[in-house]
Image (tube, rainbow, N blue to C red):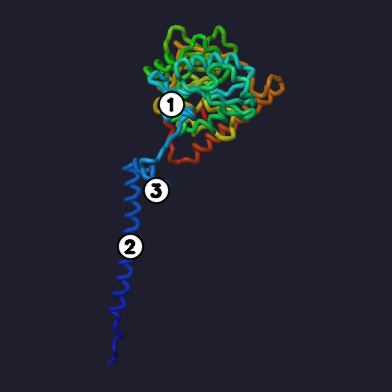
Amino acid sequence: MKIKPRTSFGFVAVFMAFVLIATIKIQHEHLKIDLRASELKGQPQERWRRGLEGLPRGIVEKTSNLELRPLWEKSRSTKNSGSCNALLAMAVGISQKQNVDRIVNKFVMENCSVILFHYDGNVDGWVDLSWNNKAIHIVAQNQTKWWFAKRFLHPDVVSMYDHIFLWDEDLGVDNFNPKRYLEIMLSEGLEISQPALDPNKSTDIHHRITVRNQRKRVHRRIYSKHGSLNCSSESKGPPCTGWVEGMAPVFSQAAWRCVWHLIQNDLIHGWGLDMKLGYCAQGDRTKKVGVIDKEFVVHQGIPTLGGPSPDKVLIVRRQSTAELKRFKERWNKAVQEDKSWRDPFEGFSRRRQR
């Protein structure tokens, strides 16, 4: 009679126990990861601890500001209750000193903060102006306002300001008041805006939507059928609606946080940005982007960056055009590669990209 070999049930039991323990351990680790992710998602107030675990909560200063502090007094805020709580930022050169003086005085009178980016290296030439010591001065040779803004106006640094004026230096402001302007911007629910351009005095108007409409307080679109431009009530994007030009934009705090991330480090002239600013409007760009007619400016169109030489002006324009092409290519590539992104203005913008 043959004897059948007996299976070692003890060995099988031990093996199964090890498998079970390993499985439970893996599941436990996955559960911990899921719970941690859930906590971070459900409790955003704890996100500040990332990388700051060694600090107690109360000592963490998450943002900064551009407020000047005295050396010889106790630490106290120099801002007062009458402040416009806005920041004027401009790239300036000494050749435009008189015009810049007129612009800055408008803002200083309303207790706004001012930061000047000196692209010609000349800072001493401004010391005789009454507001000079109230402004912050930053110097970098032959750089644009977009270059300066990307490096010195990080959203966390300027988070104390409700609005950012990122202006060119060649604007006439005889009919402009920043306080009244912001009152209109807020009452109209605008996140991105610009003052309208006076068509009678401005020498450099590129887009019809920026022209002042004397019968309106604010306009958000134009109606025109001229050449390739066909703007109607059905238009959903630039250059017909939801758009401002780059020479005098004004951003809400939320819009600026988005725009700062849109600015490319190496594309310093900013060409092409204006067509995409509406994506930072915190909603419907046809409603939250507009041109304010009541407070208007004159665009003098003075090409100062690079010097007065016509050859240098031409070189700057060629560089700007090349950067525009590269910006468009980057945008289209980003849209194609980010599968999770959905164009909030899909239909109109995708037709333009083609």
Q: Please tell me which of labels 1 and 3 falls first in the chain.
A: 3
- Foreground of the two, 145 or 13: 145
Q: Quadrant of the N terminus?
A: bottom left
Q: Please tell me which of labels 2 and 1 falls first in the chain.
A: 2
Q: Which mark is residue 146?
A: none
Residue 157 placement (x, y as % from top left)? 47, 32
In the image, what residue occupies the spot 46% across and 26% down?
278
What's under tag 3, amino acid-wise? Glu
Residue 139 placement (x, y as % from top left)? 60, 29
Label 1: which secondary element:
loop
Label 2: which secondary element:
helix
In the image, what residue occupies the spot 60% across and 16% down?
97
Residue indicated by mark 1:
161
Q: How many C-alpha atoms fall within 10 Å of the one at disc 1: few (<14), some, or many (≥20)? A: some
Residue indicated by mark 2:
25
Label 3: which secondary element:
loop
What's under tag 2, amino acid-wise? Lys
Q: Is residue 286 above or below residue 13?
A: above
Residue 210 placement (x, y as % from top left)? 51, 15
Q: Quadrant of residue 102?
A: top right
Residue indicated by mark 3:
53
Q: Is residue 317 visible?
A: no
In the image, what residue occupies the spot 29% across and 89% down?
3
